[in-house]
Image: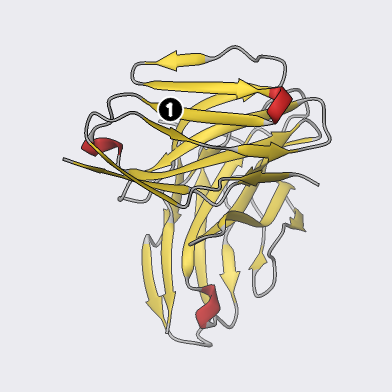
Amino acid sequence: EAQVTQNPRYLITVTGKKLTVTCSQNMNHEYMSWYRQDPGLGLRQIYYSMNVEVTDKGDVPEGYKVSRKEKRNFPLILESPSPNQTSLYFCASSTGQSSSYNEQFFGPGTRLTVL
Amino acid sequence: AQKVTQAQTEISVVEKEDVTLDCVYETRDTTYYLFWYKQPPSGELVFLIRRNSFDEQNEISGRYSWNFQKSTSSFNFTITASQVVDSAVYFCALSEAGNTDKLIFGTGTRLQVFP
């Protein structure tokens, strides 16, 4: 089954304690991205990756890091989480091909609370 | 600049009422794609529809219908005879031909359907 998985699904942590949210897709997609969802703001792109070892900032990258060492994985790293990073996070993947439309596949979401 | 506006933050209706969720978009591209997603209380994003900028035909799927009007840059979503299960947050989104892998989301409309 084609899917995007995220772990953990729920996480409560404290300010300053480094954490990683994993994202994995089994569709051999080139393009992967992270979004955060906040009330009244919708979903905003944090970082994206167009292929292995190619990553770039989205619209709200401050406080986050990513890496893309393998095609299937795109972890989101919060080196020193702060309460304003409390949010619902979605990982997404797509083929990344430049022809017409590329369907987005979303993970189930990770609800993060930073105390 | 690209932008999606969902002016209705929250809508409450009683079961069996019809309800329309508004979506207005801005883009400079002549080729773009418009989407609606549903986010039920469980939190996942459920894809509902995609429309490309060259297809202004309205679409109906069961109780759901979509009205795309380029003249007013709108892509409105109507639920006929609403049901309690329709209670969710609904997001309108846009992607542009130059970067179809990135979705620009509106801020969402929370729909509550009361029995």
- Where is mark 1, residue-wise? B78
- For the point 62% across and 46% down, which residue is it? B5
Q: Nearer the viewer, residue B94 or B5?
A: B5
Q: In this orientation, which residue lies closer to the viewer: A100 or A41?
A: A41
Image colouring: secondary structure
The part of the image, by quadrant, that contains residue A62 is bottom right
- Quarter where residue A7 is shown: bottom left
| Residue B93 image offset from top left, x and y in percent | 60, 39
Residue B22, image x, y percentages: 53, 37
B66 relative to B41, above or below: above
Compared with residue A97, is residue A66 higher up or lower down, i.e. above or below? below
Q: Residues within 10 Å of mark 1 (few under 14, many from 20)?
A: some
Q: Give the percent coordinates (x, y) of residue B95.
A: 69, 36
Q: Left or right: where does residue A55 sit relative to residue A37?
A: right
Residue displayed at 76% across by 44% down: B2
Vertical arrangement, residue B7 with respect to residue B101, above or below:
below
Q: Quadrant of the N terminus of chain A?
A: top left
Q: Residue furthest left?
A: B115
Q: Amino acid at mark 1?
A: Thr
User: Disc 1 on helix, strand or loop?
Assistant: strand
